[in-house]
Amino acid sequence: MKIASARFGEVEIDPAKILTLNEGLIGFHNYSRFVFIPFMEGTPFDLLQAIDEANLGFVTIDPFLFCADYQFDVSDEDMEDLQIKDKNKLVIRVIVTLPDDLKQMTANLQGPILINEERLLAKQLVLHDSNYTTKYRVFPESEA
């Protein structure tokens, strides 16, 4: 199946890998079908691309690659929504912002995306009572 992506043009995807986000992403509730497309070969980044809107795509990364102690609670309701019983089987991704100076890259740790890869269901959480920020530095200032 071919879809349009503003970043990559026309892209061939496997329809069996389309994720459903029943509630959409924050600010984009009208879009519920997404797919991950590798962003750059050899990097940990993927593009979470909306199936039905070429201009809607978000660069994502595994937050544990730069924040090893990242943790938050997943409610029973969220587990039910994702049709999963074991929290350890969830795949977690966060949206990153890519500024001109990539050393200044930030990640939204306050809005993780939880994914049940077996059922192709996903959900974005909002961590209201956490110390995480929407602009968490991917590269500490000492490395930048």
Image: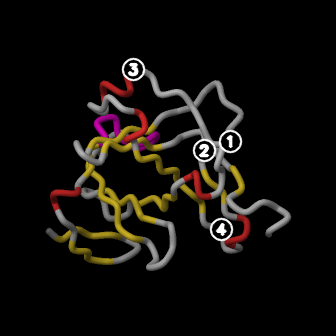
Q: Which residue is mark 1?
A: 133
Q: Which residue is mark 2?
A: 109
Report the magenta residues as a range. Answer: 21-28
**Residue drawn at x 52%, y 53% as measured from the top left:** 95
Q: CA distance from mark 3 to mark 4?
A: 36 Å
Q: Are marks 2 and 3 in contact (CB under 8 Å)?
A: no
Q: Amino acid at mark 4?
A: Pro
Q: Which residue is mark 3?
A: 76
Q: CA distance from mark 2 to mark 1?
A: 6 Å
Furthest residue to the top? 76
Q: Amino acid at mark 3?
A: Asp
Labels 3 and 4: the sequence-earlier one: 3
Q: Nearer the viewer, mark 4 or mark 1?
A: 1
Residue closest to the eye, 79 or 137: 79
Labels 2 and 1: the sequence-earlier one: 2
Q: Amino acid at mark 1?
A: Thr
